[in-house]
Amino acid sequence: MEIIKICAVSAVQTSFWGSSRNEFFTVHMPGLKKLEDKLGFKLFWIEKPVTTQEEAEAAVTEAKEKGADFLLVQSTTFAAGAVIIPFARSGILLGIWGIPEITETGAIPYNSFCGINMFASIIKQYAGKEIPYKWFYGNVDDELFMERFKVTVGALRAVKKIRSGSRIALIGGTAPGFYDLGYDESLLMEKLGVQIFYHEFGEVKDLALSYPESAAKNELDRFRGGCVSVAKDLAGEGLLNMARVYMAIKEITVKNNYDSIAIGCWPKYRKELGIVVCAVIGRLLEDNILAACEGDIESVITMMIMHEISGSMPMLMDMSKFDERDGSVLMWHCGSAPGRYADSAGVCLDGHYKPGSRVTIADDIRVAGVFDMYYKSQGATAARLSGNGKNLLAFSGDFIEKTDHSYAGSRGWIGNLSMDSKELKVRDLIETIMSKGLQHHYAVCSGRMESELREMAAWLNINEVEPVEYSNVFKRL
Protein backbone atom coordinates (compact mmCIF):
# COMPACT_ATOMS: atom_id res chain seq x y z
CA MET A 1 0.00 0.00 0.00
CA GLU A 2 1.08 3.55 -0.72
CA ILE A 3 2.26 5.75 2.15
CA ILE A 4 1.21 9.35 1.61
CA LYS A 5 3.33 12.26 2.78
CA ILE A 6 1.47 15.07 4.52
CA CYS A 7 3.05 18.47 4.97
CA ALA A 8 1.41 20.56 7.69
CA VAL A 9 1.72 24.33 7.83
CA SER A 10 0.74 26.87 10.48
CA ALA A 11 -0.64 30.11 9.02
CA VAL A 12 -0.84 32.93 11.60
CA GLN A 13 -1.31 36.60 12.22
CA THR A 14 0.57 37.48 15.37
CA SER A 15 -1.86 40.21 16.41
CA PHE A 16 -4.21 37.48 17.66
CA TRP A 17 -3.09 36.59 21.15
CA GLY A 18 -3.64 32.86 20.64
CA SER A 19 -0.64 32.70 18.29
CA SER A 20 1.70 33.02 21.25
CA ARG A 21 0.50 29.68 22.67
CA ASN A 22 2.45 27.84 19.92
CA GLU A 23 0.02 24.88 20.08
CA PHE A 24 0.46 23.96 16.43
CA PHE A 25 3.93 22.68 17.33
CA THR A 26 3.37 21.56 20.93
CA VAL A 27 -0.09 19.95 20.66
CA HIS A 28 -1.42 19.48 17.12
CA MET A 29 1.70 18.09 15.41
CA PRO A 30 2.43 15.53 18.17
CA GLY A 31 -1.23 14.51 18.00
CA LEU A 32 -1.10 13.94 14.25
CA LYS A 33 2.24 12.17 14.53
CA LYS A 34 0.65 9.51 16.74
CA LEU A 35 -1.74 8.62 13.91
CA GLU A 36 0.93 7.86 11.30
CA ASP A 37 1.15 4.10 11.74
CA LYS A 38 -2.55 3.63 12.43
CA LEU A 39 -3.75 5.44 9.32
CA GLY A 40 -0.78 4.90 7.03
CA PHE A 41 0.86 8.25 6.32
CA LYS A 42 4.08 10.14 7.04
CA LEU A 43 3.92 13.62 8.51
CA PHE A 44 6.33 16.52 8.36
CA TRP A 45 5.74 20.20 8.98
CA ILE A 46 7.19 23.57 8.16
CA GLU A 47 9.25 24.59 11.19
CA LYS A 48 8.17 28.25 11.34
CA PRO A 49 4.66 29.75 11.16
CA VAL A 50 3.78 31.38 7.83
CA THR A 51 2.67 35.01 7.97
CA THR A 52 3.28 36.34 4.42
CA GLN A 53 2.86 35.24 0.83
CA GLU A 54 6.62 35.03 0.44
CA GLU A 55 6.89 32.69 3.42
CA ALA A 56 4.07 30.60 1.97
CA GLU A 57 5.95 30.32 -1.34
CA ALA A 58 9.04 29.16 0.52
CA ALA A 59 6.94 26.58 2.38
CA VAL A 60 5.55 25.25 -0.92
CA THR A 61 9.09 24.87 -2.26
CA GLU A 62 10.10 22.88 0.82
CA ALA A 63 6.98 20.72 0.62
CA LYS A 64 7.72 19.85 -3.01
CA GLU A 65 11.37 19.09 -2.28
CA LYS A 66 10.27 16.63 0.41
CA GLY A 67 7.70 14.97 -1.84
CA ALA A 68 4.47 16.07 -0.15
CA ASP A 69 1.28 14.47 -1.45
CA PHE A 70 -0.99 16.67 0.64
CA LEU A 71 -0.74 20.14 2.16
CA LEU A 72 -2.62 20.63 5.42
CA VAL A 73 -2.70 24.36 6.13
CA GLN A 74 -3.93 25.22 9.59
CA SER A 75 -5.40 28.63 10.22
CA THR A 76 -3.76 28.76 13.63
CA THR A 77 -4.95 32.34 13.83
CA PHE A 78 -6.75 34.42 11.21
CA ALA A 79 -3.96 34.95 8.65
CA ALA A 80 -3.54 37.28 5.70
CA GLY A 81 -5.57 36.17 2.68
CA ALA A 82 -2.50 36.21 0.42
CA VAL A 83 -1.02 33.33 2.43
CA ILE A 84 -3.35 30.71 0.96
CA ILE A 85 -2.71 31.56 -2.70
CA PRO A 86 0.70 29.82 -3.10
CA PHE A 87 -0.66 26.70 -1.42
CA ALA A 88 -3.77 26.66 -3.61
CA ARG A 89 -1.73 27.06 -6.78
CA SER A 90 1.03 24.62 -5.77
CA GLY A 91 -0.37 21.63 -7.63
CA ILE A 92 -0.35 19.66 -4.35
CA LEU A 93 -3.73 18.53 -3.04
CA LEU A 94 -4.86 20.85 -0.28
CA GLY A 95 -6.61 20.78 3.08
CA ILE A 96 -7.48 23.83 5.18
CA TRP A 97 -7.80 23.30 8.92
CA GLY A 98 -9.55 25.40 11.52
CA ILE A 99 -9.27 24.86 15.28
CA PRO A 100 -11.71 25.62 18.12
CA GLU A 101 -11.37 28.75 20.21
CA ILE A 102 -10.15 28.24 23.77
CA THR A 103 -12.28 30.93 25.41
CA GLU A 104 -15.95 31.91 25.27
CA THR A 105 -15.68 35.65 25.95
CA GLY A 106 -13.27 38.57 25.78
CA ALA A 107 -10.71 39.05 23.02
CA ILE A 108 -10.97 36.24 20.47
CA PRO A 109 -7.78 34.12 20.61
CA TYR A 110 -7.64 32.58 17.10
CA ASN A 111 -10.59 33.53 14.85
CA SER A 112 -9.55 30.29 13.17
CA PHE A 113 -12.86 29.17 11.67
CA CYS A 114 -13.30 32.57 10.07
CA GLY A 115 -9.80 32.12 8.71
CA ILE A 116 -10.59 28.90 6.84
CA ASN A 117 -13.88 30.43 5.68
CA MET A 118 -11.84 33.20 4.06
CA PHE A 119 -9.30 30.72 2.66
CA ALA A 120 -12.09 28.70 1.02
CA SER A 121 -13.63 31.80 -0.51
CA ILE A 122 -10.30 33.05 -1.84
CA ILE A 123 -9.60 29.69 -3.44
CA LYS A 124 -12.99 29.65 -5.15
CA GLN A 125 -13.25 33.33 -6.05
CA TYR A 126 -9.66 34.26 -6.76
CA ALA A 127 -7.05 31.51 -6.88
CA GLY A 128 -9.00 29.28 -9.27
CA LYS A 129 -12.48 27.77 -9.22
CA GLU A 130 -11.25 24.32 -10.24
CA ILE A 131 -8.67 24.00 -7.47
CA PRO A 132 -9.81 21.17 -5.16
CA TYR A 133 -9.53 21.47 -1.40
CA LYS A 134 -11.09 19.93 1.70
CA TRP A 135 -11.88 21.67 4.97
CA PHE A 136 -11.16 20.26 8.40
CA TYR A 137 -12.17 21.57 11.81
CA GLY A 138 -11.34 20.54 15.35
CA ASN A 139 -8.53 19.34 17.53
CA VAL A 140 -6.84 16.14 16.37
CA ASP A 141 -8.85 13.90 18.69
CA ASP A 142 -12.21 15.55 17.92
CA GLU A 143 -14.64 13.34 16.02
CA LEU A 144 -15.33 16.02 13.42
CA PHE A 145 -11.65 16.26 12.55
CA MET A 146 -10.79 12.58 12.91
CA GLU A 147 -13.58 11.13 10.77
CA ARG A 148 -12.92 13.54 7.91
CA PHE A 149 -9.16 13.04 8.14
CA LYS A 150 -9.40 9.22 8.09
CA VAL A 151 -11.47 9.32 4.92
CA THR A 152 -8.98 11.67 3.28
CA VAL A 153 -5.95 9.53 4.10
CA GLY A 154 -7.64 6.47 2.57
CA ALA A 155 -8.72 8.38 -0.52
CA LEU A 156 -5.28 9.91 -1.01
CA ARG A 157 -3.61 6.50 -0.93
CA ALA A 158 -5.73 5.53 -3.92
CA VAL A 159 -5.02 8.84 -5.66
CA LYS A 160 -1.28 8.36 -5.20
CA LYS A 161 -1.44 4.78 -6.48
CA ILE A 162 -3.33 5.82 -9.60
CA ARG A 163 -1.07 8.81 -10.27
CA SER A 164 2.07 6.69 -9.90
CA GLY A 165 1.56 5.19 -13.35
CA SER A 166 0.26 1.81 -12.25
CA ARG A 167 1.26 -1.11 -14.47
CA ILE A 168 -1.65 -3.28 -15.57
CA ALA A 169 -1.48 -6.37 -17.78
CA LEU A 170 -4.16 -7.69 -20.10
CA ILE A 171 -3.43 -11.35 -20.63
CA GLY A 172 -5.22 -13.03 -23.51
CA GLY A 173 -7.56 -10.18 -24.41
CA THR A 174 -11.13 -9.45 -23.37
CA ALA A 175 -13.73 -12.23 -23.38
CA PRO A 176 -15.35 -12.59 -26.83
CA GLY A 177 -18.60 -10.67 -27.21
CA PHE A 178 -18.19 -8.68 -23.99
CA TYR A 179 -18.35 -5.40 -25.86
CA ASP A 180 -19.36 -3.48 -22.73
CA LEU A 181 -15.91 -4.15 -21.26
CA GLY A 182 -14.16 -2.29 -24.06
CA TYR A 183 -11.91 0.64 -23.22
CA ASP A 184 -9.69 3.25 -24.87
CA GLU A 185 -6.14 2.86 -23.62
CA SER A 186 -5.15 6.45 -24.44
CA LEU A 187 -8.16 7.89 -22.59
CA LEU A 188 -7.49 5.71 -19.55
CA MET A 189 -3.87 6.85 -19.51
CA GLU A 190 -4.91 10.48 -19.89
CA LYS A 191 -7.49 10.28 -17.11
CA LEU A 192 -5.83 7.94 -14.61
CA GLY A 193 -2.20 7.68 -15.69
CA VAL A 194 -2.27 3.88 -15.83
CA GLN A 195 -0.11 1.91 -18.26
CA ILE A 196 -1.49 -1.21 -19.95
CA PHE A 197 0.71 -4.04 -21.17
CA TYR A 198 -0.34 -7.01 -23.30
CA HIS A 199 0.42 -10.72 -23.27
CA GLU A 200 -1.05 -13.37 -25.56
CA PHE A 201 -2.59 -16.63 -24.41
CA GLY A 202 0.16 -18.53 -26.23
CA GLU A 203 2.80 -17.02 -23.95
CA VAL A 204 0.95 -18.31 -20.88
CA LYS A 205 0.39 -21.72 -22.46
CA ASP A 206 4.01 -22.23 -23.48
CA LEU A 207 5.31 -21.16 -20.10
CA ALA A 208 2.75 -23.29 -18.25
CA LEU A 209 3.62 -26.45 -20.19
CA SER A 210 7.33 -25.86 -19.60
CA TYR A 211 7.02 -26.61 -15.88
CA PRO A 212 7.85 -30.21 -14.88
CA GLU A 213 5.10 -32.41 -13.49
CA SER A 214 6.76 -32.47 -10.07
CA ALA A 215 6.50 -28.69 -9.77
CA ALA A 216 2.87 -28.77 -10.91
CA LYS A 217 2.05 -31.44 -8.33
CA ASN A 218 3.60 -29.37 -5.56
CA GLU A 219 1.56 -26.37 -6.61
CA LEU A 220 -1.59 -28.47 -6.84
CA ASP A 221 -1.04 -29.58 -3.26
CA ARG A 222 -1.20 -25.89 -2.27
CA PHE A 223 -4.54 -25.58 -4.07
CA ARG A 224 -5.86 -28.61 -2.23
CA GLY A 225 -4.49 -27.39 1.07
CA GLY A 226 -6.73 -24.34 0.99
CA CYS A 227 -9.89 -26.36 0.41
CA VAL A 228 -12.03 -28.49 2.68
CA SER A 229 -12.77 -30.84 -0.21
CA VAL A 230 -11.85 -31.56 -3.82
CA ALA A 231 -14.41 -32.97 -6.22
CA LYS A 232 -13.45 -36.55 -7.10
CA ASP A 233 -14.59 -36.37 -10.72
CA LEU A 234 -12.11 -33.74 -11.89
CA ALA A 235 -9.68 -34.82 -14.60
CA GLY A 236 -6.18 -35.29 -13.18
CA GLU A 237 -4.36 -33.72 -16.12
CA GLY A 238 -6.70 -30.75 -15.95
CA LEU A 239 -5.83 -30.19 -12.30
CA LEU A 240 -2.12 -30.24 -13.13
CA ASN A 241 -2.64 -27.79 -15.98
CA MET A 242 -4.60 -25.54 -13.63
CA ALA A 243 -1.59 -25.49 -11.30
CA ARG A 244 0.76 -24.85 -14.24
CA VAL A 245 -1.31 -21.91 -15.49
CA TYR A 246 -1.31 -20.40 -12.00
CA MET A 247 2.50 -20.68 -11.92
CA ALA A 248 2.83 -19.12 -15.37
CA ILE A 249 0.56 -16.15 -14.73
CA LYS A 250 2.19 -15.49 -11.38
CA GLU A 251 5.65 -15.61 -12.95
CA ILE A 252 4.63 -13.15 -15.70
CA THR A 253 3.09 -10.82 -13.12
CA VAL A 254 6.04 -10.83 -10.73
CA LYS A 255 8.69 -10.67 -13.46
CA ASN A 256 7.09 -7.58 -15.02
CA ASN A 257 6.23 -5.90 -11.72
CA TYR A 258 2.55 -5.54 -12.60
CA ASP A 259 0.23 -3.90 -10.10
CA SER A 260 -2.77 -5.87 -11.36
CA ILE A 261 -3.79 -8.17 -14.18
CA ALA A 262 -6.92 -8.84 -16.22
CA ILE A 263 -7.14 -12.32 -17.71
CA GLY A 264 -9.12 -13.22 -20.82
CA CYS A 265 -10.17 -16.48 -19.23
CA TRP A 266 -12.12 -18.19 -22.00
CA PRO A 267 -12.46 -19.96 -24.38
CA LYS A 268 -8.81 -20.84 -25.13
CA TYR A 269 -7.91 -22.26 -21.72
CA ARG A 270 -10.82 -24.68 -21.96
CA LYS A 271 -10.18 -25.65 -25.57
CA GLU A 272 -6.40 -25.98 -25.48
CA LEU A 273 -5.60 -26.89 -21.88
CA GLY A 274 -8.81 -28.52 -20.68
CA ILE A 275 -9.28 -26.09 -17.79
CA VAL A 276 -10.98 -22.93 -16.63
CA VAL A 277 -8.94 -20.38 -14.70
CA CYS A 278 -11.52 -19.44 -12.05
CA ALA A 279 -9.65 -21.13 -9.19
CA VAL A 280 -6.38 -19.80 -10.61
CA ILE A 281 -7.70 -16.27 -10.16
CA GLY A 282 -8.94 -17.11 -6.66
CA ARG A 283 -5.48 -18.37 -5.72
CA LEU A 284 -3.80 -15.30 -7.20
CA LEU A 285 -6.08 -13.10 -5.09
CA GLU A 286 -5.39 -15.22 -2.02
CA ASP A 287 -1.70 -14.63 -2.68
CA ASN A 288 -2.35 -10.86 -2.83
CA ILE A 289 -2.02 -10.56 -6.62
CA LEU A 290 -4.85 -8.41 -7.96
CA ALA A 291 -6.51 -10.32 -10.79
CA ALA A 292 -9.81 -10.05 -12.65
CA CYS A 293 -11.37 -12.45 -15.11
CA GLU A 294 -12.78 -11.96 -18.62
CA GLY A 295 -10.18 -9.31 -19.44
CA ASP A 296 -11.99 -6.51 -17.62
CA ILE A 297 -9.49 -3.65 -17.36
CA GLU A 298 -11.68 -1.04 -15.65
CA SER A 299 -12.79 -3.57 -13.04
CA VAL A 300 -9.24 -4.50 -12.12
CA ILE A 301 -8.33 -0.80 -11.84
CA THR A 302 -11.30 -0.44 -9.48
CA MET A 303 -10.06 -3.45 -7.51
CA MET A 304 -6.62 -1.87 -7.26
CA ILE A 305 -8.15 1.32 -5.88
CA MET A 306 -10.24 -0.57 -3.32
CA HIS A 307 -7.23 -2.57 -2.18
CA GLU A 308 -5.20 0.60 -1.76
CA ILE A 309 -7.90 2.18 0.37
CA SER A 310 -8.67 -0.77 2.60
CA GLY A 311 -5.81 -3.24 2.47
CA SER A 312 -8.41 -5.95 1.78
CA MET A 313 -8.43 -8.07 -1.36
CA PRO A 314 -11.33 -7.36 -3.75
CA MET A 315 -12.84 -9.75 -6.28
CA LEU A 316 -14.76 -9.42 -9.54
CA MET A 317 -18.45 -10.36 -9.44
CA ASP A 318 -21.58 -10.41 -11.57
CA MET A 319 -24.83 -9.17 -10.09
CA SER A 320 -26.92 -12.20 -10.97
CA LYS A 321 -30.17 -11.78 -9.07
CA PHE A 322 -32.06 -9.45 -6.76
CA ASP A 323 -34.57 -10.22 -4.04
CA GLU A 324 -37.24 -7.67 -3.21
CA ARG A 325 -38.27 -9.57 -0.10
CA ASP A 326 -35.21 -8.38 1.81
CA GLY A 327 -33.76 -5.82 -0.60
CA SER A 328 -30.62 -7.81 -1.39
CA VAL A 329 -28.59 -8.57 -4.52
CA LEU A 330 -26.72 -11.76 -5.37
CA MET A 331 -23.06 -11.19 -6.20
CA TRP A 332 -21.85 -14.30 -8.01
CA HIS A 333 -19.18 -15.57 -10.31
CA CYS A 334 -18.09 -18.96 -11.60
CA GLY A 335 -15.65 -19.60 -8.76
CA SER A 336 -12.87 -17.00 -8.70
CA ALA A 337 -13.08 -15.60 -5.16
CA PRO A 338 -10.20 -15.90 -2.69
CA GLY A 339 -10.73 -18.34 0.15
CA ARG A 340 -10.61 -15.57 2.78
CA TYR A 341 -14.23 -14.72 1.87
CA ALA A 342 -15.58 -18.21 2.60
CA ASP A 343 -17.99 -18.85 5.47
CA SER A 344 -17.50 -21.62 8.01
CA ALA A 345 -18.33 -24.27 5.38
CA GLY A 346 -15.03 -23.45 3.66
CA VAL A 347 -13.98 -23.78 0.02
CA CYS A 348 -14.57 -26.72 -2.29
CA LEU A 349 -12.34 -27.15 -5.35
CA ASP A 350 -14.99 -28.16 -7.83
CA GLY A 351 -15.67 -28.47 -11.54
CA HIS A 352 -17.03 -25.65 -13.63
CA TYR A 353 -20.81 -25.53 -13.93
CA LYS A 354 -20.53 -25.40 -17.74
CA PRO A 355 -18.41 -28.31 -19.09
CA GLY A 356 -17.96 -26.96 -22.63
CA SER A 357 -16.92 -28.56 -25.92
CA ARG A 358 -13.65 -29.96 -24.56
CA VAL A 359 -15.59 -32.47 -22.48
CA THR A 360 -17.62 -35.09 -24.30
CA ILE A 361 -19.19 -36.85 -21.30
CA ALA A 362 -20.18 -34.11 -18.91
CA ASP A 363 -21.44 -36.50 -16.23
CA ASP A 364 -18.09 -38.30 -16.00
CA ILE A 365 -15.50 -35.55 -16.38
CA ARG A 366 -15.77 -31.93 -15.36
CA VAL A 367 -13.37 -29.13 -16.13
CA ALA A 368 -11.15 -27.91 -13.28
CA GLY A 369 -11.34 -25.82 -11.41
CA VAL A 370 -13.48 -23.38 -9.48
CA PHE A 371 -13.64 -22.34 -5.84
CA ASP A 372 -17.16 -23.07 -4.65
CA MET A 373 -18.11 -21.11 -1.53
CA TYR A 374 -20.62 -18.94 0.27
CA TYR A 375 -19.36 -15.61 1.57
CA LYS A 376 -19.25 -15.03 5.30
CA SER A 377 -21.23 -12.22 6.91
CA GLN A 378 -19.33 -8.94 6.83
CA GLY A 379 -19.55 -5.39 5.57
CA ALA A 380 -18.96 -5.00 1.85
CA THR A 381 -18.57 -2.37 -0.86
CA ALA A 382 -19.22 -2.76 -4.58
CA ALA A 383 -17.81 -0.34 -7.12
CA ARG A 384 -17.17 0.13 -10.81
CA LEU A 385 -15.20 2.59 -12.93
CA SER A 386 -16.65 3.17 -16.37
CA GLY A 387 -16.38 5.51 -19.33
CA ASN A 388 -12.59 5.13 -19.49
CA GLY A 389 -12.25 6.17 -15.88
CA LYS A 390 -14.62 9.13 -16.05
CA ASN A 391 -17.41 7.66 -13.91
CA LEU A 392 -17.60 5.74 -10.64
CA LEU A 393 -20.48 3.71 -9.21
CA ALA A 394 -20.15 2.77 -5.55
CA PHE A 395 -22.58 1.31 -3.01
CA SER A 396 -22.27 -0.47 0.31
CA GLY A 397 -24.02 -3.13 2.32
CA ASP A 398 -23.46 -6.37 4.21
CA PHE A 399 -23.00 -9.93 3.09
CA ILE A 400 -25.91 -11.58 4.87
CA GLU A 401 -26.47 -15.17 6.00
CA LYS A 402 -28.49 -16.44 3.09
CA THR A 403 -27.33 -19.62 1.43
CA ASP A 404 -30.56 -20.45 -0.37
CA HIS A 405 -31.52 -19.17 -3.80
CA SER A 406 -27.97 -19.05 -5.14
CA TYR A 407 -25.91 -20.90 -7.70
CA ALA A 408 -22.77 -23.02 -7.79
CA GLY A 409 -19.60 -20.96 -7.73
CA SER A 410 -18.39 -18.14 -5.48
CA ARG A 411 -21.38 -16.18 -4.19
CA GLY A 412 -23.04 -14.11 -1.52
CA TRP A 413 -26.04 -11.87 -1.03
CA ILE A 414 -25.46 -8.19 -0.16
CA GLY A 415 -28.26 -6.64 1.85
CA ASN A 416 -28.72 -3.45 3.89
CA LEU A 417 -27.87 -1.48 0.76
CA SER A 418 -26.78 2.14 0.95
CA MET A 419 -25.32 4.75 -1.37
CA ASP A 420 -23.63 7.93 -0.16
CA SER A 421 -24.67 7.08 3.44
CA LYS A 422 -28.36 6.89 2.48
CA GLU A 423 -30.57 3.82 2.32
CA LEU A 424 -30.65 2.39 -1.19
CA LYS A 425 -33.75 0.54 -2.31
CA VAL A 426 -32.99 -2.47 -4.43
CA ARG A 427 -35.31 -1.25 -7.22
CA ASP A 428 -33.46 2.07 -7.29
CA LEU A 429 -30.14 0.24 -7.59
CA ILE A 430 -31.46 -1.84 -10.48
CA GLU A 431 -32.95 1.26 -12.13
CA THR A 432 -29.59 3.03 -11.80
CA ILE A 433 -27.63 0.17 -13.34
CA MET A 434 -30.07 -0.48 -16.15
CA SER A 435 -31.07 3.03 -17.15
CA LYS A 436 -27.45 4.23 -17.15
CA GLY A 437 -26.28 1.12 -19.02
CA LEU A 438 -23.48 0.29 -16.58
CA GLN A 439 -21.20 -2.67 -17.24
CA HIS A 440 -22.15 -6.08 -15.88
CA HIS A 441 -19.09 -6.53 -13.64
CA TYR A 442 -18.51 -5.14 -10.15
CA ALA A 443 -15.45 -5.02 -7.94
CA VAL A 444 -16.56 -6.25 -4.51
CA CYS A 445 -14.48 -5.90 -1.37
CA SER A 446 -14.92 -6.61 2.32
CA GLY A 447 -15.37 -3.50 4.45
CA ARG A 448 -17.18 -0.24 3.91
CA MET A 449 -15.12 2.26 1.92
CA GLU A 450 -17.69 4.13 -0.12
CA SER A 451 -16.75 7.46 1.47
CA GLU A 452 -13.09 7.01 0.54
CA LEU A 453 -14.05 6.00 -3.00
CA ARG A 454 -16.23 9.06 -3.42
CA GLU A 455 -13.54 11.37 -2.11
CA MET A 456 -10.94 9.75 -4.35
CA ALA A 457 -13.28 10.41 -7.27
CA ALA A 458 -13.61 14.06 -6.26
CA TRP A 459 -9.83 14.58 -6.09
CA LEU A 460 -9.42 13.00 -9.53
CA ASN A 461 -12.45 14.77 -11.01
CA ILE A 462 -14.28 11.50 -11.65
CA ASN A 463 -18.06 11.75 -11.89
CA GLU A 464 -20.01 9.92 -9.20
CA VAL A 465 -22.93 7.83 -10.43
CA GLU A 466 -25.95 8.99 -8.43
CA PRO A 467 -28.94 6.74 -7.74
CA VAL A 468 -31.90 6.90 -10.09
CA GLU A 469 -35.30 6.48 -8.46
CA TYR A 470 -37.26 3.55 -9.82
CA SER A 471 -40.12 4.36 -12.17
CA ASN A 472 -42.52 2.36 -14.33
CA VAL A 473 -41.93 4.95 -17.03
CA PHE A 474 -39.04 4.94 -19.49
CA LYS A 475 -36.96 8.10 -19.23
CA ARG A 476 -33.99 9.29 -21.21
CA LEU A 477 -30.99 9.94 -18.94
Image (cartoon, helix red, strand yellow):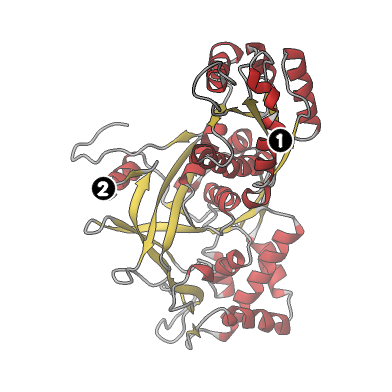
Left or right of 286 on screen, residue 176: left
Left or right of 86 on screen, residue 147: left
- Image coordinates for residue 285, horizontal then vertical, percent: 58, 64
Give me the residue at 69% from left, 43% from top: 33
Which one is closest to the eye, mark 2 or mark 1? 1
Q: How many marks?
A: 2
Left or right of 145 on screen, residue 440: left
Going from N to C along the chain, the mark reached first, 2 or 1, is 1
Residue 389 visible in the displayed image: no
- Image coordinates for residue 392, horizontal then vertical, percent: 47, 40
- Image coordinates for residue 180, horizontal then vertical, percent: 45, 46
Question: Quadrant where the C terminus lies?
Answer: top left
Left or right of 396 on screen, residue 227: right
Residue 95 visible in the displayed image: yes
Q: Kindly state the secondary structure of the residue where label 2 is placed.
A: helix
| Cα distance between the residues tagged 2 and 1 | 53 Å
In the figure, 189 relative to 282: above or below? above
Q: Is label 2 in contact with label 1 (beta carbons under 8 Å)?
A: no
In the figure, 450 relative to 313: above or below? above
Q: Kindly state the secondary structure of the residue where label 1 is placed.
A: helix
Residue at label 1?
Answer: 26
Give me the residue at 41% from left, 81% from top: 362
In the figure, 373 relative to 213: above or below? above
Q: Nearer the viewer, residue 135 or 195?
A: 135
Q: At label 2, which amino acid type do we have?
A: Arg
